[in-house]
Image (cartoon, grey):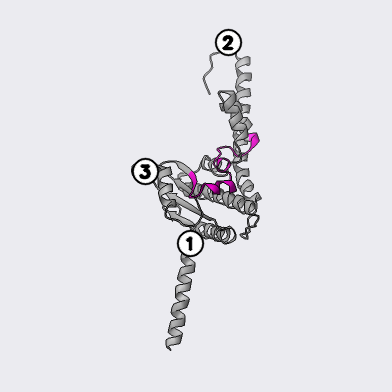
Amino acid sequence: MKIIIRGLSALILTLVFQTQLFAEYLYKDEIIHKPKLTQEVNSIGADLYKKTGISLKLIFLKELPKNMTMYKYEKQLLSSFKEPTVVLTFSEMNSIVDIETNEKALYKYFDKKQVLSPVSSYVQGLMMAAFYAKSWKEVKSMVTDVGGSILPLLGGKAHKNNMTNKYAAALFNGYLDIAQQIAHAKGVKLANGYNAATNQETLFYVKLFFYGFVLYAIIMYIRRQIYKRRHKNETFRKW
């Protein structure tokens, strides 16, 4: 009987330990609270750590602690981890997304600037430059700094009741992007069923909305110019 009890106790401790280990990659969630997201992030994180030795953690904060910057918060958190660790952190009330590591050498495995770019593609960069750039330097920046997998999704419109879905989609897309880049740099393949096209598929809908909006704006501008030419002598109201 004692042997059985000891065996059950050992099994329970093992399961508890494995559950804690598996659940540590969605490190903190003060916003989303979606079991599916937790499962997917932890699955990818566990697989990445097993194959590369690098721990990638996702953090959702409602708001940063008082009088604390994002950089200070992340560095304080990272100091508690012994293994090579990358943290992707989002703070809703502060409107900040950032990526930091506890070892500078880890940055060679992924492109932080690309992941956090507000532009998802070269075409979108050209369109944004045409409308918003005020100098050649801004044009060059908008056209070359592309491939963002988080901010283009966060920048999309969403109904108030769907904000958490937008946050979840954007940060998961970024998490997956970083994980895939690290795995590729390490020469391994993640076994989570996702591939490099997954991020682009998600961003396709963002691009579709963006280009649709741009096309609509161009059509309305042309219509307005035609209207003004046909009614030169009339007083017209602004659209």
Residue 9, picture quadrant: bottom left
Instruction: Give me the residue at 65% from left, 55% from top.
Output: 187
Q: Position of residue 111 (x, y in %)?
A: 58, 44
> Is there any visible trace of residue 215 in the rendered image?
no
Residue 188, picture quadrant: bottom right
Residue identifier under label 1: 23
Q: Measure how far apart labels 2 and 3 are at the Cα level.
A: 60 Å
The number of callouts visible is 3
Instruction: Give me the residue at 54% from left, 56% from top.
Output: 54
Instruction: Give me the residue at 44% from left, 41% from top.
Output: 95
Q: Position of residue 47 (x, y in %)?
A: 57, 60
- The answer to whether residue 5 is above or below residue 158 is below
Identified by mark 2, the residue type is Asn
Local crowd size for mark 1, using a 10 Å CA cut-off: few (<14), some (14–19), many (≥20): some
The question of residue 173 being in magenta is answered with no
Task: Specify the label residue 68 is tagged with.
Answer: 3
Discs 2, 3 touching: Cβ within 8 Å: no
Identified by mark 1, the residue type is Ala
Q: Does label 2 or label 3 sit earlier along the sequence? A: 3
Identified by mark 3, the residue type is Met
**Residue placed most toward the observer, 42 or 81:** 81
Of badges 2 and 1, nearer the viewer stands: 1
SS category of the residue bearing label 1: loop
Q: Position of residue 223 (x, y in %)?
A: 62, 23
Task: Specify the label residue 233 is tagged with.
Answer: 2
Quadrant, the N terminus:
bottom left
